[in-house]
Amino acid sequence: METKSLNIGTNRGKRRVWVEGKALERLGWVKGVTYTRKAQLLESGFTLTRDNAGDLKVAGGEGRPVLDLCGNYVAAALEGFEKVTVTITAKKITITGKAAALLLPVFVQALERVAS
């Protein structure tokens, strides 16, 4: 298992999570591997599960697999977050909003109220 902290970016106005590199390769997520995507109900984010019958595929090239996750589902699942935690295993990848990014503005407002 490997865990990464990544920024949520944008592409053509849509929120985007870009996952690439050796961590994917080490755990068998190479170009052409198929998977399914499912929203997480209790946490902000979604799960990618390896599935031979899956409609989605790992992109990239030899030695550089890429998951380019971009679209309305990213915005819906990660609303209010600027960072994600990506947990990669051989069978599943879990992408969840990083709580600190969501709670930081609330924390700063609380500090400002206490200081005044």
Image: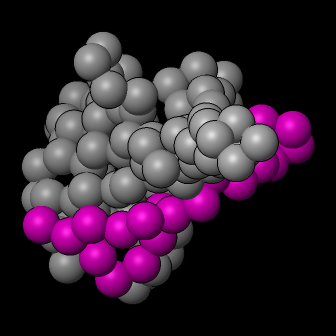
* 74 or 105, nearer to the observer: 105
> Extreme front residue here?
116
Is the C terminus in the top left, top right, bottom left or bottom right quadrant? Answer: top right
Does the image show residue 78? Answer: yes
Is the N terminus in the top left, top right, bottom left or bottom right quadrant? Answer: bottom left
Q: Is residue 22 magenta?
A: yes
**Residue at left offset 70%, top offset 48%:** 115
Q: Residue 24 sits in which quadrant?
A: bottom left
Vertical position of residue 113 compared to residue 65: above or below: above
Magenta: main secondary structure: strand
Residue 73 position within the rendered picture, expressed as x and y whole percent measured from the top left = 57, 24
Does the image show residue 38? Answer: no
Residue 29 position within the rendered picture, expressed as x and y whole percent measured from the top left = 27, 62
**Residue at left offset 32%, top offset 26%:** 43
> Extreme right residue here?
12
* Segment tinted magenta in the rendering: 1-24
Vertical position of residue 34 compared to residue 62: above or below: above
* 113 or 76, nearer to the observer: 113
Residue 53 position within the rendered picture, expressed as x and y whole percent measured from the top left = 22, 29
Residue 76 position within the rendered picture, expressed as x and y whole percent measured from the top left = 59, 20
**Residue at left offset 26%, top offset 49%:** 93
Q: Is residue 45 magenta?
A: no
**Residue at left offset 80%, top offset 48%:** 11
